[in-house]
């Protein structure tokens, strides 16, 4: 019985530690570079390119008008470029959670507008 309790406790603790951030800035930079290679017409990893675009798009969809305001008519490509260029300028941040870095980059480039905050 004691062994079963120990195994259950170990499983519970390992499940909780798995809740850590999915991707860090280091991983995001690698996918950004594949995205940049695709834009430049070079050979690239389609999975990483797609992951990067989808990751940035997801954060844009989840947080626009809450934490930043993407201008009307802006494309996902523009948001991806903003984030990628921000990452290149801030290698000291790459150890942080990817979500935090994407939000930080987008907040700097597209601060929340006063009209968007009044709508909330």
Image (cartoon, helix red, strand yellow):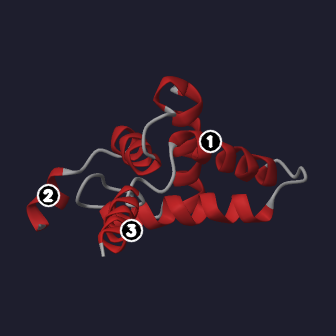
Give the side of residue 117 with respect to residue 111, left or right.
left
Give the side of residue 45 with respect to residue 6, left or right.
right
Is residue 75 visible in the rendered structure shown here? no
Give the side of residue 68 with respect to residue 71, left or right.
left
Nearest to the eye among marks 3 and 2: give it.
Answer: 3
* In the foreground, 55 or 36: 55
Q: For residue 10, which quarter of the picture?
A: bottom left
> What's the distance in space between the residues labelled 3 and 2, CA to CA?
49 Å
Residue drawn where x is 26% and y is 53% of the image:
67
Q: Position of residue 107 (x, y in %)?
A: 33, 44
Disc 3 secondary structure class: helix
Q: Position of residue 61 (x, y in %)?
A: 39, 68
Q: For residue 30, which quarter of the picture?
A: top right
Disc 2 secondary structure class: helix
Q: Which label belongs to residue 7?
A: 3
Give the side of residue 10 with respect to residue 85, left or right.
left
Q: Quadrant of the N terminus?
A: bottom left
Is residue 29 visible in the rendered structure shown here? yes
Q: Which of the marked residues, 3 or 1, is nearer the chain's N terminus?
A: 3
Disc 1 secondary structure class: helix
Residue identifier under label 1: 29
Q: Quadrant of the C terminus?
A: bottom left
For the residues bearing labels 3 and 2, Cβ distance under 8 angstroms: no
* In the foreground, 41 or 32: 32
> What's the distance in space between the residues labelled 3 and 1, CA to CA?
37 Å
Q: Which label belongs to residue 82?
A: none
Nearest to the eye among marks 1 and 2: give it.
Answer: 1
Q: Which of the marked residues, 1 or 2, is nearer the chain's N terminus?
A: 1
Residue identifier under label 2: 117
Residue 105 lies, with reference to residue 93, above or below; the image says: below
């Amino acid at each position: 019985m004691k062994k079963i309790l120990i195994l259950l406790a170990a499983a519970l603790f390992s499940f909780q530690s798995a809740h850590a951030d999915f991707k860090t800035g280091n991983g995001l930079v690698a996918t950004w570079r594949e995205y940049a290679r695709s834009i430049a017409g070079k050979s690239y990893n389609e999975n990483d390119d797609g992951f990067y675009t989808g990751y940035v798009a997801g954060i844009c969809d989840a947080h626009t008008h809450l934490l930043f305001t993407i201008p009307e008519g802006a494309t996902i490509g523009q948001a991806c470029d903003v984030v990628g260029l921000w990452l290149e300028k801030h290698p000291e941040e790459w150890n942080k959670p990817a979500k935090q870095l994407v939000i930080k980059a987008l907040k700097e480039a597209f601060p929340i507008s006063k009209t968007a905050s009044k709508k909330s």
